[in-house]
Amino acid sequence: MKKCWRYILSNLIFIVGTLSFINASGQLAPDEIAKESYYMFPIKPGERNTLAGTMGELRSTHFHTGIDIRTEGRIGLPVYASADGYVSRVAISNSGYGNAIYILHPNGHTSVYAHLDRINGKLANYIRTQQYKSESFEQNLMIKKDLFPVKKGDVIAYSGNSGSSGGPHLHYDIRDKYQNPLNPLNYGFEEILDNTPPLAEKIIVSTLNKNARVDGQFGQMTYDVMRVGNNYVIDQPIHAKGEIGIQLYAYDKLDNSRFRCGINTLEMNINDKLVYSYDIQSFSFSEQRNILKHMSYENLHFTGTRYHKLYIDDGNKLNFYTTDQNQGRIKVTVGQELPVTIKMTDAYGNESMLTFKIIGKDFPESLYSYDNLKYDIDVIENTFVYKIPKEQTENGVMLNGTSTVPDYFINNTGIYLHDMRREIPKVLQVDKSFKTYNFKDKVPHEMDYKYYNKFLDIYFPSNSLFDTLYLKTDYKLDTVDQQEYFEIGSTYVPLRKSIKVTLKPQGHYPKSKYAIYSVYDNGYKSFEGGSWEADKVSFWTRSFGKYTILSDTIPPKVTPLTLSSNSLRFKISDNLSGIKSFKCYVNNEWVLMNYDSKRALIWSEKLNDNKPFTGVVKLLVEDMQGNINEYSNTLN
């Protein structure tokens, strides 16, 4: 608190001075907030600090909503209230934000402090009382106005690593009156220094229809960029024709920080004309899932790299773009020379440029030494791609009974491109051999749709898809272990909303101990659950993939670490389905146990610190399939 006296003493002057800036909606204009230093930095205010993440940064399934403030790699740093207000909400969870405080301010904004280790003062006592009252560790408490008033500079909590945090830090949001995230770096925090412009590493140029080519080929071509000062170039022209799209892998680094953060503003100009811009200063939580169309979900799945698409892809409903009439898609005609400039700007106004040329060129349909296609069979956009060596095609190639010819050759291998909007590929005949494909249906995205077959049913609610889906399904029985596997769709195709899947197993299962699990490429199995009706089991999922039905009959494991009059600590773990719940009692009285799944650790927190634990200690731990381990011991 001593560090913050200068902030606290100025509160009255500050409040009077800022009232004149409040507009009719009850919110300060952002430039006035920044100018008047309305918000105080919540960690080590007045001292230099660095960030591990910024607002708008691309995450695997969402845009980052705030900034991640580093806490010296440790927990326990004081967390200060950024401005006057009152606590409007507290959330306590083992996942997501973990322990989080929400403060509503007079300007209508809400500041959020997440991944906290512990909460301070009377608020902590209130939360603990509610936990004991409901006999639940997890809480989502909406707090009455003025029950817990806060002054700017008050220590409200201590930083931690709770919830889904990957390491100690403070996640900090500023949200408008609609709870839409705003960029905290727009509000004049001098604790963060950034004179470093964004960095670019590579681009992808993609064909967007069957007739397009990039350097003579269909699909996507990757180009590394060369740094020249603070800017970047591709020193050779890119030859293309038809409709293409640009994807950019770039990021921002703040001064004295190794972390790759997000870029807030991107612009692409062709012939000095703006064709695409992206400016993320705020967004709605309901729009988050659209990130799977903003970035290349396929490249994220296969390489872990998050590319910005510099065009608006089908199904992307985000509203922070400005584009030309082609929505950033580039139409290249033979003979054109198109100079491309991509400008990257971070939250502090630092800029860098990437420049290159696209030259429209026609290509001979033969003999390219480099093969950019990953697989012998693939689906790219609406095009079914397959490769066949030339020596195997002397007697012709037929797809669905119709003769077909290659679109071009690579090293005497024919590349065949089939427009799936016209017809779904079923059977490929090469000479006298036949190959069948698992494409079952063409599913529209804008309406409810139901698919049925012998092994599974799928219900697609309206707009659960981003775009038309060419549905693949498969069923396999492992005859060695008699395990059934159901494959649905492709894991690199994203879903906007959940779909309902009903599996029709061919075996018979005791329903009480069997459930659905997703199966990952590395063999890891994740509990999905499901409800049984007769011999069918149904579940909702927001991911395509591979599923099976497994039994978990082994109760969770409980390992006591500390059993004393002042403290109870246990390790809890489960072999398959995962921990569902735990309850601890001392002499039949419920005891609050905090939970950190990352450490598989639970530990006690007393309602009355002066009352020792004594008598029978009983811990009940249940897994997701209903197996219970009951641990018991006696404290004298």
Image (cartoon, grey):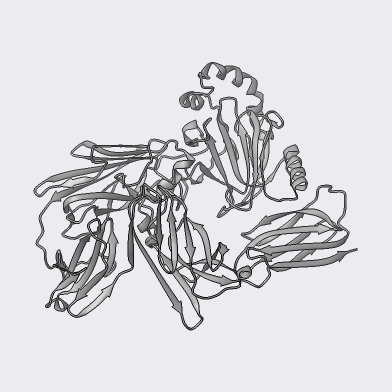
Decide: is 12 above or below 367.
above
Count of labels shown? 0
Q: Left or right: where does residue 217 sit relative to residue 249?
A: left
Decide: is 524 above or below 344.
below
Residue in the image at 75% along x and 65% along y: 561
User: In this rendering, does residue 389 appear at all?
Assistant: yes
Q: Left or right: where does residue 632 sit relative to residue 235?
A: right
Q: Nearer the viewer, residue 80 or 282?
A: 282
Give x and y (percent) for residue 45.
59, 36
Pick the quarter of the image with the N terminus.
top right
Residue in the image at 52% along x and 24% along y: 27
Q: Residue furthest bottom?
A: 480
Q: Residue furthest right?
A: 636
Give x and y (percent) for residue 374.
29, 66
Pick the quarter of the image with the C terminus.
bottom right
Q: Left or right: where does residue 580 sit relative to residue 565?
A: left
Q: Residue furthest front?
A: 534
Give x and y (percent) for residue 608.
84, 47
Give x and y (percent) for residue 451.
40, 59
User: In this rendering, does residue 304 appear at all?
Assistant: no
Q: Nearer the viewer, residue 291 or 22?
A: 291
Q: Quadrant of residue 275?
A: top left
Q: Quadrant of residue 328?
A: top left
Residue in the image at 75% along x and 45% along y: 128
Residue in the image at 27% along x and 41% along y: 327
